[in-house]
Image: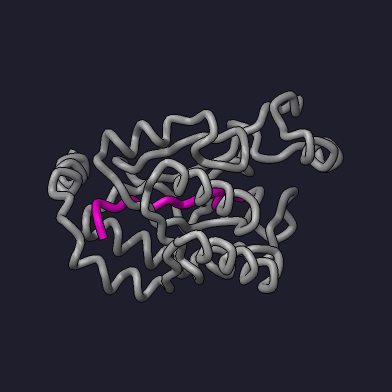
Amino acid sequence: MGKTALLIIDMQNDFCLPGAPLEIKGAMSVVPQIKKALDASRKWGLPIIYIIRHYRADGSDVEITRYHDFMKKGGACIRGTKGAEIIDELKPLKGDYIITKRRWSAFFQTELDMLLRRLNVDQIVVTGVQTPNCIRATVWDANSLDYEVIVLTDGTAAKTQEVHRANLYDMQNIGIQLMATDEFISHLPNLPKNNYLLEIRASIEER
């Protein structure tokens, strides 16, 4: 395993909470595993990168395939609203990174690739929702950009287990590594230490 960053994708209120406008069934079930991966990654100094979705209130930047649903439900993930915030269980800390995406992939027209290269990251660990859409699109683009990719099988979710498993199978078939959260955590002591990140976080927390 090389220099690694943890990605947490779309774990926002409007996607995750029961009854939310764009609720993804099963999203909350993987929160404990993502939290375990998050806490362990912070302990070992890995960069933490949250990928979130923001839309304009008038829907002018919503995907054409989601526009009707967005308008019917009165909007979702609108910047500045409670629904657009990251769920309480996974709140970012000072020193974490937040990338806003406009489409499925975290790499599409965002600064994610530049940020990862500036941090000398060559491997990403992907968590969040949902597997066939934003997870899959991000993984495919990461593979095209020559990042090593690990997907946490119990830290990602879809509306059904069948959809989840089918997409994991497809990702594995292009060479993506699949790991359970505990397996990933067991590898963390073997990673090159990101000491500069640990020092930065310690400095921030002292302020």
**Range of the magenta residues?**
1-13
- The quadrant of the picture occupied by the C terminus is top left
Q: Residue at x 43, y 73 (%)?
A: 180
Q: Is residue 22 magenta?
A: no
x and y percentages locating residue 15 in the rendered image: 65, 51
Q: Is residue 3 magenta?
A: yes
Q: Is residue 154 visible?
A: yes
From the viewer's side, name the closer residue of 95 and 174. Answer: 174
Q: Is residue 183 above or below residue 188?
A: below
- The quadrant of the picture occupied by the N terminus is bottom left
From the viewer's side, name the closer residue of 20 and 177. Answer: 177
x and y percentages locating residue 66 in the rendered image: 77, 40
Q: Residue at x 71, y 55 (%)?
A: 23
Report the side of 61 relative to 27 (left or right). Answer: right
x and y percentages locating residue 20 in the rendered image: 71, 52
Which residue lies most toward the front here? 174
Q: Residue at x 46, y 52 (%)?
A: 8
Q: Residue at x 33, y 52 (%)?
A: 123
